[in-house]
Amino acid sequence: MEESETSKRWQSEQWDEWEPDWIHGGFHSVLRCGKRTCDLVRVVGKMELVADERGGWDGQSWVHEFSPLFFHPALPLLQSHEAAPEAVLQRVAAASTVLWADPSSAANRLRSAVEALMDDQGIPRKGSGKKGPFDLTLHKRIENLATAKPAYADAAQMILAVKWIGNVGSHEDALKSSNVLDGAEILDFALTEIYDKSRDAIKQLAAEITARKGAPAAKYIPGTSFFDL
């Protein structure tokens, strides 16, 4: 942690308007997880002195607040990375690199990840009308996903939420990192619903066991002419 030269000057000049919350600067650190296989993560950010909402014995106390701006390597935002398409993963990774410094830009990259998801699912980018082909909005493509693949209707509703966050990021500078993290979490869940087939296998297994009312499945024994029931 290091106070900036400007902050030090403001304090040394003893301006009448000076308050402790004028103190600011930066910090850098190295993060290490408990697993030996994890890479070290370097983080850089800003430091400010802010009023402690809990107060102190004198009714006023101050604490240092640290706000990260960059992590290297960027922090992963998805748990479904083993199943999700590479084009989607690349765009989510791009969102992660700017998440803390520019949340609106990160939200826009999540929106781009949704576009890539629609491509991977074979949802056309263009429609046809009386005047010929026309570009479909991302909103319409997501609706088309739910229509073309009803099994993904719930996932499509979640993806719409990610699209709305991306829209705000494209046109306004009002998003916080927490808003983008919400979008990433929702997208992660939707990707798991679409691409993680292990759930389908478990559902199928449960259905088969229920159909047999718990009885073991028939197994053929090599070298014999009968089945073990």
Image (tube, grey):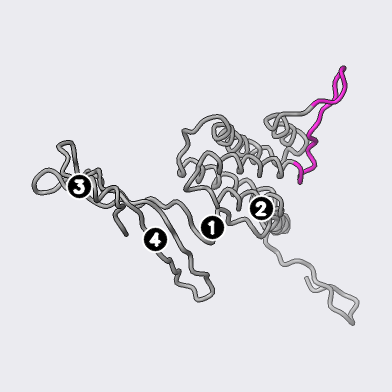
Residue 111 is situated, as x and y percent measured from the top left of the image, at 63, 39
The three-letter code of the residue at mark 1 reads Ala
Q: Is residue 74 above or below residue 224?
A: above
The three-letter code of the residue at mark 4 reads His
| Label 3 vs 2, first from the N-terminus | 3
The three-letter code of the residue at mark 2 reads Gln
Distance from Cα at disc 3 to Cα at disc 1: 35 Å
The part of the image, by quadrant, that contains residue 123 is top right
Distance from Cα at disc 2 to Cα at disc 1: 12 Å
Say few, some or many: other residues with alpha carbon within 10 Å of mark 1 (under 14 / 14 to 19 / 20 or more): some
| Label 4 vs 3, first from the N-terminus | 3
Q: What residue sits 19% from the left and 40% below the top? A: 18
| Label 2 vs 4, first from the N-terminus | 4
Q: Is residue 92 above or below residue 118?
A: below
The residue furthest bottom is 223
Please give the label number shown on residue 90. Answer: 2
| Label 1 vs 4, first from the N-terminus | 4
Closer to the camera: disc 1 or disc 4?
Answer: 4
Distance from Cα at disc 1 to Cα at disc 4: 15 Å
| Label 2 vs 1, first from the N-terminus | 1
| Element assignment for label 2 | helix
Closer to the camera: disc 4 or disc 3?
Answer: 3
Say few, some or many: other residues with alpha carbon within 10 Å of mark 4 (under 14 / 14 to 19 / 20 or more): some
| Element assignment for label 4 | strand
